[in-house]
Image (spheres, helix red, strand yellow):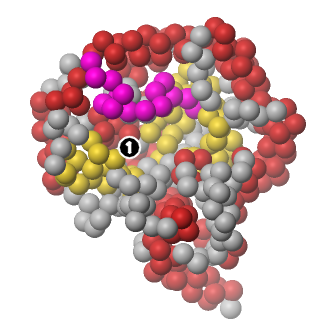
Amino acid sequence: MKTNRIQEDRRSFLKTSGLGLAALAFPFQLLPEYLKDVPMGIVVHSYGTRWHSKVESSSYPGFQDALDLMAHCHQIGAGGIQVGVNGWAVDFAKKVRDQRENMGMYLEGSIGLPKSSSEVAAFETEVRAAKEAGATILRTVCLSGRRYENFHSAQEFQAFKTQALQSIHLAIPIVEKHKMKLAVENHKDWKAAELAAIIRDIDSEWLGVTLDFGNNVSLLEDPMEVIRTLAPLAFSTHIKDMGVKKYTDGFLLSEVPLGQGIVNVKEGVKLCRKYNPAITFSLEMITRDPLKIPCMKDDYWATFEEMKGEDFEKTMAMVEKHVFKSDLPSTSNLDPEGRLAFEETNVLECLKVSRKII
């Protein structure tokens, strides 16, 4: 009887999981057995709508802190979480540690880099809190925005690079002191070779990469080439798949459920494990409107002096060949409850697929 119920639940889930709002009422407390014990973790940005949500929802209550996020991710079968550690007091960090240990989950922190020596003490406080909670890896970014939107000249980008290098150099002695791995994400700022050169030039065993499988499509880079370049340096990952479609000024780019887009996630996972058998795999399935990559406008190219026309041609040919067959995910046409439901559906679909990949 139990086996028949699991099969019925599985068929029901498979029928609704790809339909977005059709899964609106899917109760997480009744998840089928086959979704449990999934080792892939979840990045907090996968719950960008639900994180600190003010929406009154009985089905999708907001996550107010890391404890809420961890409890839910454990409930749906994820293996760990990656979440910001800013503002964590010692007693809260201990609560995170206790809950993490009880649930048998991994924890990765997300942390901002110090911009000047005056910010180093605050940075160290956050490193201490993350370590107290049981994190061993701290993901960080050098740019919170996007290269082609933030900078409009080579000089502006060079000034950013100078500041970013200063910030990393300020952080290195702290993470070395506390034996915490600092992992810089390719966050629509660095091309893969640029980030690899930075990590290798600094040459610290405590500095590596959070390898995002899809971000650099926005910089006209092939996902597998990015993975091949950065996997040898990766401490952690953001697992995602990407859908693409042309638009007037270039192409649209969206995170889509694993297996539906242009990223060979399975091969990427194998390559990461080749270089780091203990690497963690964390889902970053961001449910939002498609991003516009305006690579047909002159301003897009302002910081890419070394980029060749063939990069553009290869990328647009890829977009033409692998155009997403249905509408790319969108949330602007949904009400608040619908956005929460769509987000949860996408996370669950990715967890399901991950069992075949990770």
Residue at 29% from the left image edge and 34% from the top image edge = 219
Q: Which kind of residue does numbered mark 1 sit on?
A: Gly
Q: Position of residue 7 (x, y in %)?
A: 57, 84
Q: Position of residue 265 (x, y in %)?
A: 40, 50
Q: Is residue 151 left or right of residue 240?
A: left
The residue range painted magenta reads 139-153
The answer to which of 38 and 125 lies nearer the viewer is 125
Mark 1, residue position: 214
Work out whether 320 lies above or below 119.
below
243 or 121: nearer the viewer: 121
Do we see residue 307 in this rendering? Answer: yes
User: In which quarter of the view is residue 232 placed?
Assistant: top left
- Report the predominant secondary structure element of the magenta stretch: loop
Q: Residue at x 72, y 26 (%)?
A: 126
Q: Dot 1 surroundings within 10 Å: few (below 14), some, or many (20 or more)? A: many
Q: Where does residue 339 sit, x and y in percent of width and height?
A: 50, 64
Instruction: Determine which quarter of the picture holds residue 325.
Output: bottom left
